[in-house]
Amino acid sequence: MAIKYIDQLNLEGKSVIIRVDYNVPLDKEMTITDDTRITATLPTLNYCLGKNAKIILISHLGRPDGKIVPRMSLKPVAKRLSALIGKEVKFIEDPISDKSREEIKKLKNGEIALLENIRFYPEEEKNDKEFGKKLASMGDVYLDDAFATAHRGHASNEAITKFVKECGAGFLLKEEIEYFKKVMANPERPLTAVIGGAKISTKLDVLKNLLTKVDYLIIGGGMAFTFLKAKGFNIGKSLLEKDLLNTAKEILELGKEKILLPADAVIAAEFKNDSPASIVSIDKIPDDMIGLDIGPETIDEFGKILKKTKTVVWNGPMGAFEMTNFAKGTIEIGKAISKCSVSVVGGGDSVTAVNENGLADKMSYISTGGGAFLELLEGKTLPGVAALDK
Ligand code: AMP
């Protein structure tokens, strides 16, 4: 794939349309509670400003399903971005109207405009060509810097690319693409994947694809119990996906030299933080108990593999980490991962665990995409990235 990056394009004095992902969390008062997704785009925006460009930003927020939903307006984002970048950000209420298009045309070099939530228009998610054409006509160059949306083929990241003269990836998307290549295409080995979380069903293709790439596949979290059951262990009342038992067996067979499963577990009678916990060997889970975290022996065994690992990719917690009494496995494995030469983390829960436990700056890279990151792990080509290949 031959994608151009922002620093390979001539942006001097141009009108640059940038697809960003400002899908930030808002509280009831419409105050942004986490602006990571906005700050993550500042390198791209500042670079464009340095080139004296006019910037037209496109984003979505939430799932308004093609209708105007006032609580999903990007207005608060315009305000926050303006504070972060130290410049006025013009907010364009109805980007497709003639009046707004005139406003955009009048932008001066070095000025920034943010369009209202693009998913207020049903054409966006339909990847409507005419809509993409209208968006494309707003500027000279198109940059995609929205990795977290790259697994969707929508008008503002796919159709639009058919109508712009030049397009490429912003710094955020560039970093995601390059880090992923570093991990999966040409890793320093041993390469280990650590996969956890609740279910096998949501990560089946991830597991299958990773097995073809990694040296070790560490499986923890709720999904480990279906594998353990498939191996013949009694798992009590732990999470089980009965219909995937055969699939789990197949995966275990495929990866018999690579897969590591928990050797012990932290168990409790109820899915509650204050439910008294104990540690048992994996072949001693009583019928009425639930496995809610990996135990110390597992932390040790997984840790040994991670110690000799050079490159690691992590998605999914090792236990029900939202409950402090069942968070130790995730935290300890997080620490071991952070000591590998190249550590890449992606997916909401693992990123939360990393952030909450002061591990963020110890990781080589934290992906900004949940779904998009998983699709890369599945070995898929992301439509938003493929569209940039002109
Ligand atoms: P996922 O979205 O698939 O990555 O799953 C994340 C969720 O899995 C978190 O909310 C965890 O609480 C949950 N989880 C991890 N381990 C377990 C477990 N042993 N039993 C129940 N839930 C778990």
Image (cartoon, rainbow, N blue to C red):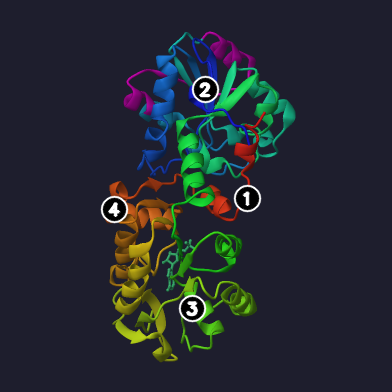
Residue underneath mark 4? 359
Give the residue drawn at x 31%, y 74%. Answer: 300
Give the residue drawn at x 44%, y 11%. Answer: 52
Which quadrant: the C terminus?
Answer: top right
Category of crowding for the residue at label 2, using alpha-carbon neighbours closer than 10 angstroms: few (below 14), some (14–19), many (at least 20): few
Q: What residue type is labelled 4?
A: Leu
Secondary structure of the residue carrying tag 4 is loop
Residue underneath mark 3? 225
Secondary structure of the residue carrying tag 2 is helix
Q: Is residue 53 magenta?
A: no
Category of crowding for the residue at label 3, using alpha-carbon neighbours closer than 10 angstroms: few (below 14), some (14–19), many (at least 20): many
Residue underneath mark 2? 8
Residue underneath mark 1? 380
Can you tell which mark lies on residue 73?
Answer: none
Q: Distance between the residues labelled 4 and 1?
A: 29 Å
> x, y (%) of residue 123?
69, 34
